[in-house]
Image (cartoon, rainbow, N blue to C red):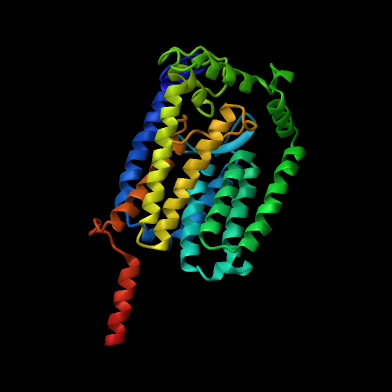
């Protein structure tokens, strides 16, 4: 689908119709290695390195503002160029936050009942939101905020604190929209895209044309018309519009069923995890996939104002597909250990307990 949605624009802009396909293939290959690595890398070690993971993530998020390293596109600085490769730190930040929060909440289950106990997670999540908002990227900022709130809730945050943070967070959204003129324009275009069909409303109108043209069974693979420079970002944020046009409503529903099945399986893995940390890790990965998929569907169908969130595993973007596949690797690791199949993995917690018992006996 990345090739189908991008070959014309890739040839037009870069003189190579395989430009986006090659980049995506590289991301998938690296993602496969990452998935295999994390499948066999004992996930308990992630808890040990939680501060290193968070620290590295903050460094990457800060590097986007460094001249010569940060890459700007369409007025946003969201990428870092390292050794000829572009990395999108905000994609890494979502999963780094899940690892940190799962590690902290599983070790401090009783402390999180108090406001003081919640502060480390709130500070880390808040700083990530600030850095990502400065790029600017409101959509990823909201995703990070949702992830933080979700992880705190499943980690045992009280109802009082849930309301305390949810209400101000919800109130901040319209304020952030009003403060930035381009966000207000997007909101107005969402309400009535035909008020500016050649301006802010253009992308949504073209997306709806694409989905409408697909009908029940689509116009056929590679036969989309909107990808011929009519629909901006057809290979990335709006790839679902091209999917709907080429394989139709039925095909799109089947694709959504696959996402539903994936999230369902991850929830089952989380429920069967042998410890709180594993359960929270898998729950966090499942939540990111579910929320990002739902937001992407809502955007391309005109249900919410346009955002910059890609469709997990499918949208063009090497960093995105790589970190999502790494996330699945972590979930597979939790599954293997919960079934007792991972005999070679070193369980740090068990080793500590055994070591303590031996000392007591001696």
Residue closest to the eye, 302 or 186? 302
Can you give x and y, in whole percent of width and height, for residue 344 in the image?
A: 23, 59
Above or below — where is 356 with respect to 259?
below
Q: Determine the image quadrant of residue 23.
A: top left
x%, y% of residue 235? Answer: 49, 24
Residue closest to the eye, 78 or 112: 112
Residue 228 image position (x, y, % from top left): 52, 13
Residue 308 lies in quadrant? top right
Depth order, front residue of 164/82? 164
Rendered-image quadrant of the C terminus? bottom left
- Which residue lies at the image location 56% right of the left edge and 67% below the top edge? 112
Residue at the image position 48 percent from the left and 49 percent from the top: 95
Quadrant for the N terminus, please. Answer: top left
Residue 137 seen in the current view: no
Q: Quadrant of residue 30?
A: top left
Q: Is residue 193 visible?
A: yes
Farthest residue toward the bottom? 362
Please say if 348 is above or below 265.
Answer: below
Q: Is residue 223 above or below residue 120?
A: above
């Amino acid at each position: 689908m990345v090739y189908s949605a991008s070959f014309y624009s890739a040839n037009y802009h870069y003189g190579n119709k395989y430009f986006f396909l090659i980049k995506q293939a590289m991301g998938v290959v690296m993602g496969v290695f990452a998935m295999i690595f994390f499948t066999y890398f004992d996930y308990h070690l992630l808890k040990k390195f939680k501060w290193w993971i968070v620290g590295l993530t903050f460094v990457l998020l800060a590097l986007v503002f460094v001249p010569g390293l940060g890459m700007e596109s369409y007025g946003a600085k969201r990428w870092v160029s390292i050794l000829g490769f572009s990395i999108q730190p905000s994609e890494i930040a979502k999963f780094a936050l899940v690892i940190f929060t799962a590690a902290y909440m599983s070790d401090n289950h009783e402390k999180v009942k108090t406001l003081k106990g919640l502060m480390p997670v709130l500070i880390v999540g808040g700083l990530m939101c600030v850095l990502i908002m400065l790029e600017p990227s409101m959509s990823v900022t909201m995703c990070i905020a949702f992830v933080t709130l979700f992880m705190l809730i499943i980690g045992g945050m009280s109802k009082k604190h849930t309301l305390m943070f949810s209400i101000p967070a919800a109130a901040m959204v319209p304020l952030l929209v009003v403060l930035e003129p381009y966000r207000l324009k997007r909101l107005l275009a969402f309400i009535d895209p035909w008020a500016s069909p050649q301006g802010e409303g253009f992308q949504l109108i073209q997306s709806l044309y694409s989905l409408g043209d697909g009908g029940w069974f689509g116009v056929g693979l590679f036969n989309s018309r909107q990808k011929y420079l009519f629909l901006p970002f057809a290979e990335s944020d709006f790839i679902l519009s091209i999917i709907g046009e080429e394989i139709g409503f039925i095909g799109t529903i089947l694709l959504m069923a696959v996402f539903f099945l994936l999230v369902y399986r991850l929830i089952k893995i989380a429920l069967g995890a042998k410890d709180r940390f594993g359960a929270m890790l898998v729950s966090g990965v499942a939540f990111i996939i579910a929320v990002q998929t739902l937001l992407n569907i809502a955007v391309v169908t005109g249900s919410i104002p346009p955002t910059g969130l890609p469709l997990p595993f499918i949208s063009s973007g090497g960093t995105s597909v790589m970190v999502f596949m790494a996330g699945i690797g972590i979930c597979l690791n939790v599954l293997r250990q919960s079934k007792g199949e991972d005999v070679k993995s070193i369980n740090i917690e068990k080793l500590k307990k055994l070591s303590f018992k031996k000392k007591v006996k001696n």
